[in-house]
Image: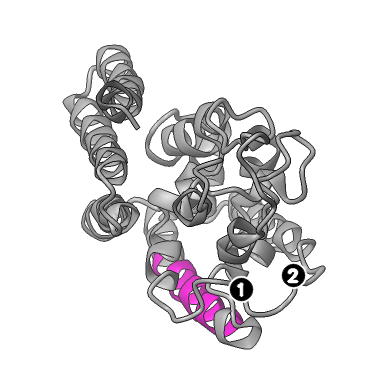
């Protein structure tokens, strides 16, 4: 990788987030958005640069910088529900703040540019699950993806029921739902990881956010592609992929194509630098 390309991708990603930061700052008249998205963009750019410099823990650095910030500062300190319940709450109140902005940037429109990058670099649930021992799936993928639609519907029904019942103190309830929801996600994620011997089992089968992420990721600008002239079909990329994606197929309909989290494990594993 030449020097120019090492800097180009991190710089481009930083500029995208900086543009979002400035636009939100000027339109919402709130300095927080400038600081928030500048921090996230800088963290991601740093990780991409570290990856380009062949630092093996580059993605983990970003996960910890962004995931911890969102969980601890935005979630626990600022008491914002950044889970899907928070998104429905702000959406129903007609307020474009907090979780609705977060979902718009990271999980609805953002994937048109960086696909499932949220899952690989910023998700605070996956941040913890990736410390478990099953980095490479040790069992065939299960046909349990329908469960994500159950959890997605459950979150929508929960928030809808609160509004229909005219419950007071909604903000307090949303914060408690954030605490309970995160605890439940971690417990379920760890249990699934050990049951299926796969750190990313929760992401594949249970995470409700993927209902937004998957269809938009189909059109992602940033994708792992394969140079067929270099590929020797050794299969090493498929063996290390935590999401079971067939990265040797450049078609957008490739197997599990919308599951790619841009972790770049396949790129690092390829002996011919075909990816």
x and y, in percent, of residue 62 in the image: 29, 50
Label 2, secondary structure: give it.
loop
Look at mark 1 in the image and give the residue it sits on. Answer: 137
Q: Quadrant of the N terminus?
A: top left
Task: Give the distance between the C-alpha atoms of the residues marked 1 and 2, in whole angstroms.
Answer: 8 Å
**167 left or right of 259?**
left
Number of other residues with Cα within 10 Å of mark 2, as a class: few under 14, some 14 to 19, many 20 or more: some
x and y, in percent, of residue 93 in the image: 51, 35
Of 189 and 76, which appears nearest the observer? 189
x and y, in percent, of residue 2 in the image: 31, 27
Using the image, determine if residue 168 lies above or below residue 184: above
Look at mark 2 in the image and give the residue it sits on. Answer: 141
The part of the image, by quadrant, that contains residue 194 is bottom right
**97 left or right of 35?**
right
Magenta-drawn segment = 178-192
Q: Evaluate if marks 1 and 2 touch, with contact meaning CB atoms under 8 Å apart.
A: yes
Label 1, secondary structure: give it.
loop
The residue shown at (61%, 73%) is: 137
Res. 126 visible in picture: yes
Q: Quadrant of the C terminus?
A: top right
Magenta segment's dominant SS is helix
């Amino acid at each position: 990788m030449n020097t120019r390309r090492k800097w180009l991708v991190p710089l481009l990603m930083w500029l995208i987030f900086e543009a979002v930061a400035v636009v939100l700052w000027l339109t919402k008249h709130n300095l927080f958005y400038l600081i928030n998205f500048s921090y996230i963009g800088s963290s991601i750019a740093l990780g991409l640069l570290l990856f380009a410099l062949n630092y093996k823990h580059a993605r983990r650095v970003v996960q910890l910088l962004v995931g911890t910030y969102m969980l601890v500062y935005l979630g626990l300190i600022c008491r914002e529900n950044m889970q899907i319940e928070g998104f429905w709450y702000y959406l129903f109140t007609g307020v474009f703040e907090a979780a609705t902005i977060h979902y718009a940037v990271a999980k609805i429109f953002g994937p048109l540019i960086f696909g499932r990058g949220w899952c690989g670099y910023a998700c605070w649930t996956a941040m913890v699950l990736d410390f478990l021992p099953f980095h490479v799936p040790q069992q065939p993928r299960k046909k349990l993806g329908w469960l994500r639609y159950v959890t997605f519907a459950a979150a929508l029904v929960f928030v809808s029921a609160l509004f229909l019942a005219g419950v007071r103190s909604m903000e307090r309830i949303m914060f408690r739902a954030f605490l309970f929801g995160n605890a439940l996600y971690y417990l379920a994620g760890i249990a699934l990881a050990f049951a299926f011997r796969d750190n990313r089992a929760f992401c594949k089968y249970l995470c409700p956010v993927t209902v937004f992420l998957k269809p938009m990721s189909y059109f992602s600008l940033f994708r792992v592609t394969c140079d067929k002239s270099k590929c020797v079909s050794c299969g090493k990329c498929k063996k290390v992929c935590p999401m079971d994606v067939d990265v040797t197929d450049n078609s957008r309909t490739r197997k599990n194509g919308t599951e790619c989290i841009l972790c770049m494990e396949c790129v690092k594993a390829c002996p011919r630098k075909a990816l």
